[in-house]
Image (spheres, rainbow, N blue to C red):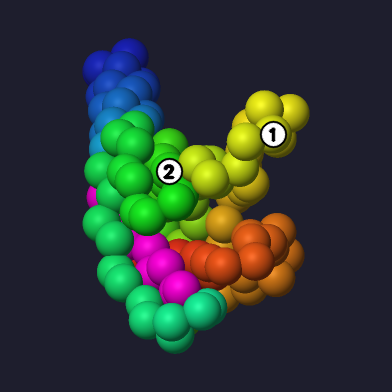
């Protein structure tokens, strides 16, 4: 009779372990899928005319806006709700530039809360990251 009690305790521990691992796997899969988006919203400001336009970019697709070719590779929302942070990997080419040495005007991660960390430096246009969904 003592053997059956020990086997029962081992089975409960094993069942607890299985449930714990399943719960951790489920939450990690759901959290990643909610944080990464497929559409990136950016705002482009024309410094000369003082007009801005909101662009919605599908990740991986290249969009042309006047003299700029803009491509969003990936975007992600932060895990924290109290201080939301949106990050996106963006590539920007200046199509009016005839110098073939400079391929990208901007190629890197852009942050919504701190655009000055990796600034987009262009004499005519300015770009801000708005949303990722």
Circle nearer the viewer, 1 or 2: 1
In the depicted structure, whether residue 98 falls above or below residue 14 = below
Q: CA distance from mark 1 to mark 2?
A: 15 Å
- Residue lying farthest bottom? 50
Q: Quadrant of residue 27?
A: top left
Residue 69 circle label: 2
The dot on residue 33 is: none
Residue 33 versus residue 126 in the image, above or below: above
Q: Residues within 10 Å of mark 1 (few under 14, many from 20)?
A: few
Vertical order, 48 against 101 (above or below) = below
Span highlighted in magenta in the image: 37-46
- Secondary structure beneath dot 2 equals strand
Residue 112 colored in magenta in the image: no
Q: In screen coordinates, is 15 left or right of 69?
A: left
Front in this rendered view, residue 76 or 51: 51
| Circle 2 crowding by C-alpha within 10 Å: few under 14, some 14–19, many from 20 | some
* Pointer 1 with pointer 2, Cβ within 8 A: no
Q: Position of residue 116 (x, y in %)?
A: 70, 70
Residue 99's mark?
A: 1
Q: Position of residue 38 (x, y in %)?
A: 27, 44
Query: Which residue is pictured at 57% across the width and 68% down the height?
Result: 124
Any part of residue 123 in sight:
yes
Up-down: is 98 above or below 31?
above
How many marks can you see?
2
- Locate the C terminus by quadrant: bottom left
Q: Is residue 133 among the parts visible in the rendering? A: no
Closer to us: 30 or 131: 131
């Amino acid at each position: 009779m003592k053997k059956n009690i020990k086997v029962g305790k081992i089975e409960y521990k094993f069942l607890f372990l299985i449930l714990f691992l399943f719960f951790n796997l489920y939450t990690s899969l759901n959290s990643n899928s909610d944080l990464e988006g497929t559409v990136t919203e950016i705002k482009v400001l024309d410094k000369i005319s003082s007009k801005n336009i909101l662009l919605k970019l599908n990740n991986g697709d290249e969009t042309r806006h006047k003299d700029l070719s803009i491509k969003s590779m990936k975007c992600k929302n932060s895990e924290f709700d109290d201080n939301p942070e949106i990050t996106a990997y963006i590539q920007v080419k200046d199509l009016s530039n005839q110098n073939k040495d400079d391929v990208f005007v901007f190629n890197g991660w852009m942050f919504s809360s701190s655009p000055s960390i990796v600034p987009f430096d262009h004499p005519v246009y300015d770009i801000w990251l708005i949303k990722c969904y």
